C-alpha cells in the first residue's frame, strides 16, 4: 500500500508536463497501466480502508464497527510493542544504513586498484533474497554457532545467549542482517550520486583552501540533495515494509518481543483471522509512511522553488 | 515443466492478492485454485506437500481413478499456503470439491458457517469406526461433515540405548518422571528436549498433556472452546506442576525448531522429547529402530486417561459440483484398502482410522495404537481442539512462561485477554 502511494505521486507528477495535443499512444501508456493499477492496487487499497472499519473473519460478512478497531489499538499491548519496535527499527535500521552507506560510498568512490572488489563485496548481500539472508544469519546465531564461538574465542563467553530467542536481543539480532544488506544498497545509490557531482566544484573548493572535511560538508552533501530524497523514501518504505527478514528469523517472537507493525499485521490477518483489525494496522502503517515521506518531500519542494 | 501463460497469470494473481491484506481477503470471488472443471472430475485440494506424503497421495488418487468410479484430480499446495487460503477456497464461487483437513473443532468451525457438504450417507459404510471418531466428525448441528482416514499419537520419545546407558527406565507416574529427570541431569545431559525456535507450538503439547492429566479432557476442551478462563486457578495449577520440571528443559531448545530438537535427541544431547510421531519423518531410518516412547506420566490417577491423537482426513465443499461423485470418493477413502495404501506409501507412523486397516508392522506403531485404543478420551492438539487463530496466543503465553515463570499471573491475564479477542472475532 505504501509503495503504491509513491508510485501514484510520481505518476501524477509526470502527467503535469503534457502538451495540449496528446497522442493516443501516450494516452494508452497512461490509461492502460492506470486501469491495471486500479484493479490490482487502488481498488484493494480502498477495500482495505473499508475493512479497517469492520470486524471480519474472512468467512462471514464483515460487520461495521466504525473506528472501533483503532480504539482497540490504544489498549493493545502488542500493538504498542510493535509500534515501539517499528520506531526503533526506523531509527536504527534507517539511520545506520544511511550513515554506513554514505560512509562506504565516500571511502569507495575514488577509482583505485581493487576498489571494484570491495564495492562488489558490499553489494553482494543485496543480491540475496532476504529469506536467504535470514537463513544464513540464523546459522550464525544458532547455539554454539559462529557468533557464540567467536565470543567464546575472544573471552566474552559470558555474553553468549540464545540471540533470537531472548526477548532483549531478538530485535537487534534481526536488525544486524537487515543492515548488512541495506548498507550495500544505500552505498550504490550514493555512489551514483557522487559520480554526478561536478569535479570542478571540488577543484574550486580546493583552490579556496577547503579541507577534506569542509569539502564533504559544503560541497558533497549539498550536491547530494536529490539522492537524499530518494534514499529517504527508500529507507522509510523499506523500514515500514520490513517483514520477510523478521518473519523468517523470529516470526515476531519470542512472545511478540521483536514484533513490527508489518509482522503483527500479518499474524492478526492470517493466523488470528481478525482481518478487520489487521486492515486497521495496515492503514496505520500507510499513514505513518505517508506522514514521514510527505513531510520530507514538501520541505524539499519548498526549498527548490 | 515450462510455465504456460495460465500459470503465469495465476502467479500474477497470487502476487496481487498477497501484496495487501485486503487484496487477499477480498479476492473471495476468484481464484478457487484447482476448481473450475465441470467435466465430472473431482478436484482434491491437498496440503500433504511433504515428499513422501505427496507421493502417497498421488498413488492413492491413481488407484481410485483406476477403479473406474470417477476421476479425481489432485492439487497439492504447500501446507502453510493451504492453511491461510482455506477460507478463501471454501467461500469462493467455484471451490475445489474435496480437501485434506483435520477432525474436530477446526472442521466444525467451517460447518458452522454452512460451508461443508453433509456426508452422513458416507458414514453408512463406516459402522465399524469407533465412537470417538464419530463424535469428532459430527458438526455441532449433528451432521457428519468429516471422513477421518488416519491418526497419529504424541508421546515422550527417547533412545533405548541411552536410557540403558544412563540406568533409567521409562516412568509411569509424575514422581517417577521427576526422578528420571534428576538422574539424567546428573549425567550432565539436559533431560527434556524441546524445539521452540520457529515451531513454538510444540510447547502446547506440554500444556495440553498437563491440563488433561490434571483437570481432565472435558475441562481442557471447554477451555479451548472459549467456555473457560485462562486465569482460572485450575489453569494455574497446570503451570505450577510444569514449573517442577522447568529446570530439566534443554536451554538451547528455545533457539531451534523441533527438527533440530529431534537431532539433539537422536544424538544423545537430550534425554527425552514430547513430540508427535511426525518427527520420524526427519529422522534417519537406522536411528528409528532405537527409538521408543512412554505415555505422558499420570499425575492424578482419578482423572480418566486421555491421549492426544490428532486425526486427519477429508471434508468437502457444500458447493461441490457433483455431490454424489464426491461422496463416492469419500466412501473409497474410508475403506481399509485406501488407508493402508496411503499409510504404506507415506512415512509409516500414521495409523489407519478404519479399525480394520493395518498399520505399519513395527513394535513402535503397535504400542502407539494400543495406547490410543486404551485411552478413555482423545484430544486432538491445541490448535485442532480450538482454532488456528487461538494457537498464536498460546505460543506467546507458553514461551514467555518458559522464559519467565515468575510472571505467570500476568502471563495468564494477557493470555485470557488475547484469547477473548479471538473468540469475539
Image: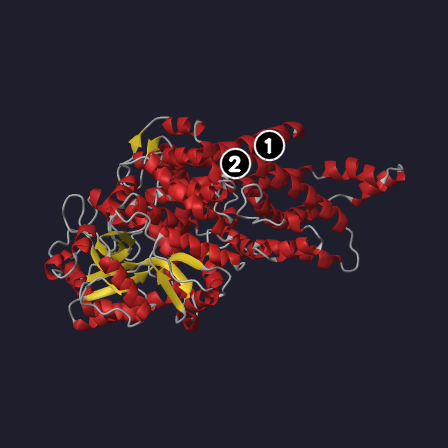
Residue B141 visible in the shown view: yes
Q: Is residue A190 above or below residue B312?
A: above
The mark lying in front, picked from 2 and 1, is 1
Residue drawn at x 48%, y 51% as measured from the top left: B248
Q: Give the percent coordinates (x, y) of residue B121.
A: 11, 56
Asked if labels 1 and 2 touch by Cβ distance under 8 angstroms, the answer is yes
Kind of element beneath mark 2: helix
Left or right: B424 with respect to A176? left
Left or right: B283 with respect to B220? right
Left or right: A207 with respect to B151? right
Q: Give the percent coordinates (x, y) of residue B257.
A: 47, 55
- In this rendered view, identify the residue nearer to me: B392 or B121: B392
- In the rendered view of the protein, which quadrant contains the C terminus of chain A? top right
Residue drawn at x 34%, y 35% as measured from the top left: B233
Q: Give the percent coordinates (x, y) of residue A31.
A: 43, 42
> Dot 2, crowdedness within 10 Å: few (<14), some or many (≥20)?
few
Q: How many marks?
A: 2
**Residue that label 1 marks:** A297
User: Mark number for residue A9?
Assistant: 2
User: Mark number for residue A40?
Assistant: none
Amino acid at each position: 500500500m505504501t509503495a503504491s502511494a509513491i508510485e501514484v505521486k510520481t505518476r501524477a507528477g509526470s502527467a503535469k508536463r503534457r502538451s495540449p495535443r496528446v497522442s493516443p499512444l501516450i494516452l494508452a501508456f497512461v490509461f492502460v497501466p492506470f486501469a491495471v493499477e486500479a484493479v490490482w492496487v487502488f481498488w484493494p487499497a480502498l477495500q482495505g480502508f473499508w475493512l479497517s472499519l469492520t470486524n471480519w473473519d474472512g468467512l462471514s460478512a464483515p460487520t461495521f464497527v466504525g473506528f472501533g478497531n483503532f480504539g482497540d489499538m490504544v489498549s493493545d499491548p502488542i500493538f504498542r510493542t510493535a509500534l515501539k519496535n517499528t520506531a526503533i527499527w526506523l531509527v536504527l535500521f534507517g539511520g545506520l544504513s544511511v550513515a554506513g552507506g554514505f560512509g562506504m560510498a565516500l571511502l569507495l568512490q575514488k577509482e583505485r586498484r581493487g576498489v571494484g572488489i570491495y564495492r562488489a563485496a558490499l553489494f553482494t548481500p543485496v543480491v540475496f533474497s532476504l529469506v536467504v539472508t535470514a537463513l544464513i544469519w540464523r546459522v550464525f546465531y544458532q547455539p554454539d554457532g559462529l557468533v557464540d564461538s567467536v565470543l567464546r574465542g575472544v573471552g566474552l563467553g559470558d555474553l553468549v545467549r540464545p540471540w533470537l530467542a531472548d526477548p532483549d536481543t531478538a530485535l537487534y539480532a534481526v536488525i544486524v542482517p537487515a543492515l548488512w544488506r541495506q548498507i550495500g544498497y544505500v552505498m550504490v545509490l550514493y555512489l551514483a550520486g557522487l559520480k554526478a557531482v561536478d569535479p570542478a566544484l571540488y577543484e574550486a573548493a580546493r583552490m579556496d583552501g577547503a579541507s577534506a572535511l569542509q569539502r564533504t560538508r559544503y560541497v558533497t552533501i549539498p550536491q547530494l540533495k536529490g539522492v537524499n530524497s530518494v534514499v529517504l523514501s527508500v529507507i522509510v518504505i523499506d523500514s515500514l515494509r520490513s517483514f520477510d527478514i523478521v518473519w523468517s528469523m523470529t516470526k515476531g517472537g519470542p512472545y511478540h518481543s521483536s514484533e513490527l507493525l508489518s509482522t503483527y499485521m500479518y499474524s492478526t490477518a492470517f493466523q488470528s483471522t481478525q482481518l478487520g483489525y489487521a486492515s486497521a494496522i495496515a492503514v496505520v502503517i500507510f499513514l505513518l509512511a505517508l506522514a514521514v515521506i510527505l513531510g520530507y518531500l514538501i520541505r524539499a519542494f519548498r526549498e527548490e522553488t | 515443466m515450462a510455465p504456460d501463460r495460465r500459470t503465469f497469470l495465476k502467479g500474477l494473481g497470487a502476487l496481487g492478492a498477497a501484496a495487501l491484506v485486503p487484496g487477499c481477503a477480498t479476492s473471495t470471488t476468484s481464484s478457487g485454485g484447482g476448481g473450475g472443471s465441470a467435466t465430472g472430475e473431482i478436484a482434491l485440494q491437498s496440503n500433504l506437500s511433504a515428499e513422501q506424503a505427496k507421493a502417497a497421495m498421488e498413488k492413492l488418487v491413481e488407484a481410485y481413478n483406476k477403479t473406474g468410479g470417477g476421476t479425481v484430480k489432485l492439487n497439492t499446495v504447500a501446507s502453510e499456503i493451504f492453511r491461510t487460503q482455506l477460507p478463501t477456497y471454501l467461500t469462493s464461487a467455484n471451490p475445489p470439491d474435496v480437501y485434506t483437513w483435520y477432525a474436530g473443532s477446526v472442521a466444525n468451525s467451517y460447518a458452522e458457517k454452512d460451508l461443508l457438504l453433509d456426508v452422513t450417507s458416507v458414514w453408512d459404510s463406516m459402522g465399524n469406526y469407533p465412537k470417538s471418531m464419530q463424535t469428532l466428525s459430527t458438526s455441532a448441528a449433528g451432521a457428519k461433515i468429516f471422513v477421518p482416514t488416519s491418526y497419529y499419537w504424541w508421546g515422550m520419545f527417547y533412545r533405548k540405548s541411552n536410557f540403558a546407558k544412563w540406568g533409567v527406565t521409562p516412568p509411569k507416574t509424575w514422581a517417577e518422571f521427576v526422578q528420571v529427570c534428576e538422574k539424567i541431569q546428573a549425567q550432565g545431559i539436559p533431560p527434556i528436549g524441546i524445539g521452540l525456535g520457529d515451531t513454538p507450538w510444540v510447547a502446547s503439547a506440554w500444556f495440553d498433556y498437563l491440563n488433561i492429566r490434571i483437570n481432565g479432557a472435558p475441562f481442557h476442551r471447554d477451555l479451548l472452546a472459549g467456555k473457560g478462563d485462562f486465569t482460572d486457578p485450575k489453569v494455574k495449577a497446570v503451570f505450577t506442576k510444569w514449573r517442577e520440571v522447568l529446570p530439566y528443559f534443554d536451554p538451547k531448545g528455545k533457539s531451534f525448531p523441533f527438527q533440530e530438537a529431534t537431532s539433539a535427541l537422536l544424538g544423545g544431547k537430550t534425554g527425552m522429547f514430547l513430540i508427535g510421531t511426525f518427527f520420524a519423518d526427519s529422522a534417519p531410518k537406522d536411528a528409528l529402530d532405537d527409538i521408543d516412547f512412554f505415555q505422558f506420566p499420570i499425575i492424578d490417577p482419578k482423572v480418566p486417561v486421555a491421549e492426544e491423537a490428532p486425526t486427519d482426513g477429508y471434508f468437502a465443499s457444500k458447493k461441490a459440483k457433483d455431490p454424489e461423485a464426491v461422496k463416492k470418493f469419500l466412501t473409497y477413502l474410508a475403506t481399509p484398502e485406501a488407508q493402508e495404501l496411503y499409510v504404506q506409501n507415506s512415512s509409516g507412523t500414521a495409523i489407519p482410522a478404519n479399525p480394520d486397516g493395518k498399520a505399519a508392522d513395527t513394535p513402535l506403531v503397535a504400542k502407539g495404537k494400543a495406547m490410543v485404543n486404551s485411552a478413555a478420551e482423545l484430544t486432538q492438539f491445541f490448535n485442532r481442539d480450538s482454532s488456528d487463530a487461538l494457537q498464536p496466543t498460546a505460543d506467546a503465553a507458553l514461551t514467555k512462561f518458559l522464559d519467565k515463570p515468575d510472571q505467570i499471573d500476568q502471563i495468564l491475564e494477557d493470555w485470557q485477554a488475547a484469547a477473548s479477542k479471538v473468540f469475539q472475532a
